[in-house]
Image: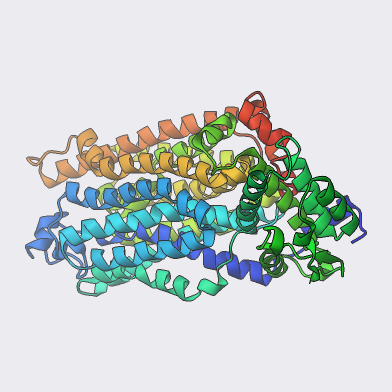
């Protein structure tokens, strides 16, 4: 209050993230935990004995099979094991395409809370102990995975300030990696020591979902969605009432909104009389008070009924008063954006508007394509199997190590992403991925290295690969995608980006084990040593292919992906200005002040 804008921004940037923001963000991120756990929890259950045969475990002819492996209860073939994993991805693909619909119509909060039912029902069915229940349960959980991959990053981005958006949005990936680690540790304990332990691993998925439903009062709604939803209704009412001509309506609404929030009654009276707005709608006064003591008219009577809810929400989520955070200023910016969005179209965002932002679509789709096709989910889906094929006897421990490293490095990246920027972490992490993939493949193809050493190097190379992914493609992609699209189109665009990601994961989930056998030339007539060498060759060939895609991703990032730190959406998408739809977004100022100072 009374400080210059530059001083205000500097003070705000130095303010710590409030406790209520952390609490709210972590509760939202329970959905991120469910995402990571659900699509990786089957991995640690696919453990065989020394014979490396699932049928030997089922027929009880291999005493070294773990007590709780799924193969003791279900005689899954390689294709069926891939199908169970793939059905999760099929459901996720459908879920990510559908996820934006309830998020846009009913709100982000309603979407994430309702999505818990998918995880609860899916977990209950998958844990029944038969192959059909496993398939159906994983498919239903997959739908929840898809919705959880779209809505939570958007909600986290929209409850954060520009100064904290990088850290808060990266929580999605951090908690997701914690879930992957949890799945590997829980799988190790249950599968190794508990009879039918794989069923408990699948059933555990319902627990976080139930916890989130119990904490439903603590889940925040997006202030942007609250104001945008009301603004659309208000604009529709103004259009139908004919209170202002179409050309002047957006400007009139913006000025009126600002005047009401600032308590400028003279300006409000002037606008309402000039534009034939019913002054009785503004008769209730002094009912809303800001922290600075400014009196304002009631906004509920003219269609801005969510105003006080947004005020209360932001007071909880923003820094304390001694850091000079001005809730009024943020709401003014959000309302201005909401009115401009509403003025552009009377209807919900369309795919035509999304594709009008050509540069953003190329960046978002490209990043999601390379995040998946570089092979990280082959590790999260099948690491225990791959370590076993590579010659590492304690494969489930290797999986737990990978999960732990993934989580810890992702936590570190949440701190670094706002310090060093997006593109530095993105490219450096991807270079680390490339080096590790080439190392893994080269070592497995070498006949001069002992099998035990090959197994240890395989674990080291995969851990290094995950380190690079966690620093780069894993954490940074979510932040960039939340920053390159205008607010109005963000949820729908995320559905598009994630559908590309899940389509690639579908191929990886269904083809990885088959490709290892095919590229390695594995045959049933081979003896154990020949089969082991062929499987190692297959793993090496698969990861050489992933290395090729990783090299392509580095070229894509260098050429197409901008540094988004400190840049506005308008600057990032300048190439789209020639397009009519996007030009209208820009000319109407569809970039909030929070977007203008992305850090």
x%, y% of residue 468?
51, 46
The reply, left or right, for residue 27 in relation to residue 39 is right
Q: Residue at x 20, y 45 (%)?
A: 532
Above or below: residue 370 compared with residue 36: above
x%, y% of residue 442?
36, 36
Residue 10 appears in the picture as rendered: no
Quadrant holding the N terminus: bottom right
Q: Residue at x 26, y 43 (%)?
A: 510
The reply, left or right, for residue 462 in relation to residue 130 is right
- Using the rendered view, name the quadrant where residue 509 is placed: top left
Above or below: residue 502 compared with residue 582: below
- Using the rendered view, name the quadrant where residue 190 is placed: bottom left
The residue positioned farthest toward the top in the image shown: 578
* Nearest to the observer: residue 449 or residue 498: 498
Above or below: residue 320 compared with residue 142: below
x%, y% of residue 166?
64, 52
* Nearest to the observer: residue 138 or residue 57: 138
Colour pattern: rainbow
Residue 588 appears in the picture as rendered: yes
* Nearest to the observer: residue 287 or residue 320: 287
- Using the rendered view, name the quadrant where residue 55 is placed: bottom left
The reply, left or right, for residue 223 in relation to residue 506 is right
Q: Residue at x 18, y 46 (%)?
A: 79
> Disc count in the image?
0
x%, y% of residue 536?
26, 42
* Nearest to the observer: residue 362 or residue 584: 584
Above or below: residue 216 compared with residue 490: below
């Amino acid at each position: 209050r009374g400080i210059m804008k530059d001083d205000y921004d500097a003070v705000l940037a130095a303010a710590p993230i409030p406790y209520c923001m952390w609490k709210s963000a972590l509760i939202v991120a329970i959905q991120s935990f469910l995402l990571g756990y659900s699509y990786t929890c089957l991995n640690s259950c696919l453990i065989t004995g020394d014979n490396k045969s699932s049928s030997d475990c089922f027929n009880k002819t291999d005493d070294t099979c773990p007590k709780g492996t799924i193969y003791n209860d279900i005689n899954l073939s390689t294709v069926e094991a891939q199908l169970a994993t793939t059905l999760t991805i099929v459901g996720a693909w459908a879920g990510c395409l559908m996820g934006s619909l309830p998020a846009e119509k009913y709100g982000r909060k309603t979407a994430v809370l309702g999505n818990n039912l998918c995880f609860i029902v899916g977990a209950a069915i998958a844990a029944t102990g038969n192959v059909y229940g496993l398939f159906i349960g994983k498919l239903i959980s997959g739908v929840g995975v898809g919705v959880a991959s779209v809505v939570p990053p958007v909600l986290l981005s929209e409850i954060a300030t520009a100064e904290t958006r990088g850290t808060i949005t990266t929580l999605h990936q951090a908690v997701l990696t914690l879930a992957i680690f949890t799945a590997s540790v829980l799988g190790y304990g249950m599968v190794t020591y508990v009879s039918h332990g794989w069923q408990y691993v699948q059933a555990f998925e319902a627990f976080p979902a139930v916890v989130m439903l119990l904490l439903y009062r603590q889940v925040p709604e997006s202030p942007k969605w609250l104001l945008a939803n009301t603004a659309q209704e208000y604009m529709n009412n103004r259009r139908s009432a004919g209170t202002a001509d179409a050309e002047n309506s957006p400007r009139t609404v913006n000025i009126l909104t600002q005047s009401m929030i600032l308590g400028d009654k003279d300006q409000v009276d002037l606008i309402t009389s000039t534009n034939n707005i019913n002054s009785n709608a503004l008769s209730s006064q002094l009912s809303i008070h800001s922290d600075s003591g400014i009196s304002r008219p009631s906004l509920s009577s003219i269609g801005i009924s969510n105003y006080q809810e947004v005020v209360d929400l932001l007071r909880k989520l923003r820094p304390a008063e001694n850091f000079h955070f001005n809730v009024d200023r943020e709401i003014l910016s959000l309302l201005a954006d909401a009115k401009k969005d509403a003025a552009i179209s009377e209807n919900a965002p369309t795919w035509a508007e999304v594709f009008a932002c050509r540069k953003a679509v190329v960046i978002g789709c490209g990043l999601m394509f390379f995040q998946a096709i570089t092979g990280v989910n082959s590790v999260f889906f099948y690491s225990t199997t791959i370590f076993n094929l590579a010659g590492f006897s304690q494969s489930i421990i290797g999986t737990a190590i990978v999960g732990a490293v993934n989580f810890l490095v992702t936590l570190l990246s949440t701190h670094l992403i706002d310090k060093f920027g997006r593109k530095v972490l993105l490219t450096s992490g991807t270079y680390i991925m490339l080096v590790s993939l080439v190392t893994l493949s080269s070592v497995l193809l070498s006949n001069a290295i002992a099998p035990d050493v090959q197994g240890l190097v395989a674990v080291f190379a995969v851990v290094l690969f995950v380190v690079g992914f966690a620093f780069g493609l894993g954490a940074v992609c979510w932040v960039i995608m939340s920053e390159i699209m205008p607010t109005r189109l963000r949820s729908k665009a995320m559905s598009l980006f994630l559908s590309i990601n899940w389509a690639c994961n579908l191929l990886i989930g269904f083809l990885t084990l088959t490709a290892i056998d095919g590229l390695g030339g594995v045959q049933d007539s081979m003896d154990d040593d020949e089969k082991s060498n062929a499987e190692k060759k297959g793993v090496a060939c698969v990861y050489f292919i992933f290395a090729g895609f990783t090299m392509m991703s580095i070229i894509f990032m260098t050429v197409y992906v901008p540094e988004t730190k400190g840049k506005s959406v308008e600057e990032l998408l300048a190439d789209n200005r020639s397009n009519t739809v996007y030009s209208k977004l820009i000319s109407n100022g569809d970039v909030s002040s929070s977007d203008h100072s992305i850090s």
